[in-house]
Amino acid sequence: MITPLTPIDWKRRAVKYYPNKIAVIDEEKQFTYKEFANRADRLSKALYNAGVRQGDHIAVMLPNTHYMLECFYGIAQLGAVMVPLNYRISAEDMEYIINHSDAKMLIVDEEFTPPIEKIVERLNLEQIIVVAVDGFQTNLNAVYYEDFIKHVSNVELPQIEIDENDLLTINYTSGTTSRPKGVMLTHRNNYLNAADFLYHLRVHHDDVYLHTLPLFHVNGWGGIWAITAAGATHVCLRKVDPPVILDLFENKGITFFCAAPIVLNMIMNHPKVKETKITRKMRMATAGAPPAAAIIKKAQQLLGLDIIHVYGLTETTPFILYCEWKEVFNSLSEDEQATIKARQGVEMIFNGETKVVRPNGEEVEWNGEEVGEIVARGNTVMKGYYKDPEKTNEEIVDGWFHTGDLAVVHPDGYIEIRDRAKDIIISGGENISSTEVESGLYKHPAVLECAVVAVPDEKWGEVPKAVIVLQEGAEVTEQEIITYCRDNMAHFKAPKSVEFVDALPKTATGKIQKFKLREKNWKGAKRVN
């Protein structure tokens, strides 16, 4: 017998072997695996009673709460397709995604209903379900979540035959330069990505996992499925708040979490971090942007974090690379270790093949110098963009998905990103990696956050500019920063100007939106690159 690869089967396993173990902790509430599964099943049956059938699409806009976890399982086991929504995007983008995705229902947190109220008349929805939140009230014509599921008298679910190549979710990209694109991810995609999450991030039964990463972001990178598969404990986090996170580290026995480098930086620079006492070994996975070696070093020193650097994209479910740690690396200095941990690394076991290629498709030399584009094929590459075959064919060429990330390959096969293709700075014919300059800036004690972008220059075409958020109380001049860079890197790579700001523009997952910084500096000028 061949059974389909689907991560929803791990819920069945968790209930079978760990029915009384705490599955979910959400502030003052907690549920065993048996209780959690019952709530997910009640949601499934309520949706079915409301007319949801296999293949139907349901949009969900919730923070990291037990309701969001219930939705992933409750929707998927019906054979329906979940469309996780980023609650920080504009009402205009919400309208586009909900209608473009053909969602027939919306499940939304009450705090996030105001933008929906503005556009509800233009949405092609049959029903809206609202999760009640203290302190908020909506005017939407909707049913409340707890009322929706409490009237289910029989939780026996309909028999659904799921093919592993059926859609499980449609995850929309941020749409920074065009309309958001709906990435179609299958049950098989999610299963094998979660297998990589389980194996390479070393998930085990006694883990207590903090959902720091937004669950709408590529399905929590697969943590939604992997933590349940191991029978570990999910700890919910409604919003990223460093003192709350540090308190959970200390008092809830957190052993593992995932976060973008920017979020890690926020945690490491909060005053409370020096008072936090952790007696157990914690590990974390970080991705979303190449983490600066200086941040990795600081995290290891202050919290003793075992940091695992991973890499991927929404289109690859997302994992395709991780920085595999070898025993021989332990004999290196802290600085050398941090430099290695900043690399994206090698292929994960279950995702398929990843390599760095020249424009003609040939693989670059493994010399740590020749730059090419990262491409991937295999088990975790998306089915395509929803209702956009033309864009799908642009990104997947001859069976290879083109990431747009530029990288080198070191002699040991470890891939290291040098930049996004659109973020590379071409100054006087020289290619300058913005991430390389940023890594140097993060070593300056006054720098809290930074981004380096290209700005127009009459002589060189374009030159690097640093946009910096300073540490609290720090004082430093533009010339001091420029001099520091010139003293620590090739002169042509050093920023030619510096702007100090209170905050950098970021996505909901903590990625710095460099395009916004570029737009401000290129008004009235045309950038060739």
Image (cartoon, rainbow, N blue to C red):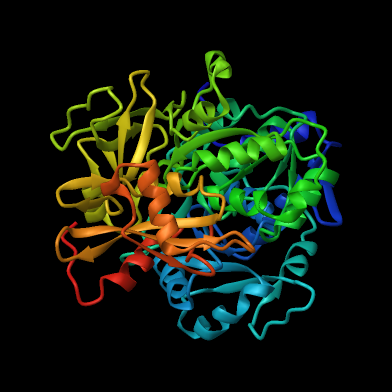
One can see residue 513 in this view? no
Res. 63 image quadrant: bottom right
Q: Nearer the viewer, residue 138 or 422?
A: 422
* Residue situated in front as seen by the camera: 59 or 156: 59
Q: Residue at x 17, y 28 (%)?
A: 362
Residue 295 visible in rendering: yes
* 274 lies left or right of 184: right
Q: In x, y percent, where is residue 205?
A: 74, 28
x then y, percent, for residue 189:
46, 38
Residue 190 in percent (x, y) is at: 51, 39
Residue 312 in the image, given as x and y percentages of width and height: 43, 40
Q: Quadrant of the C terminus?
A: bottom left
The residue depicted at 52 percent of the width and 35 percent of the height is 309
Pick whichever, 511 or 191, lies toward us: 511
Left or right of 423 on screen, residue 107: right
Residue at the image position 21 percent from the left and 49 percent from the top: 394
Q: Is residue 183 above or below residue 85?
A: above
Q: So how many labels did they put on this image?
A: 0
Query: Which of the 4 image quarters holds residue 416?
Result: top left
In the depicted structure, whether residue 321 falls above or below residue 137: above
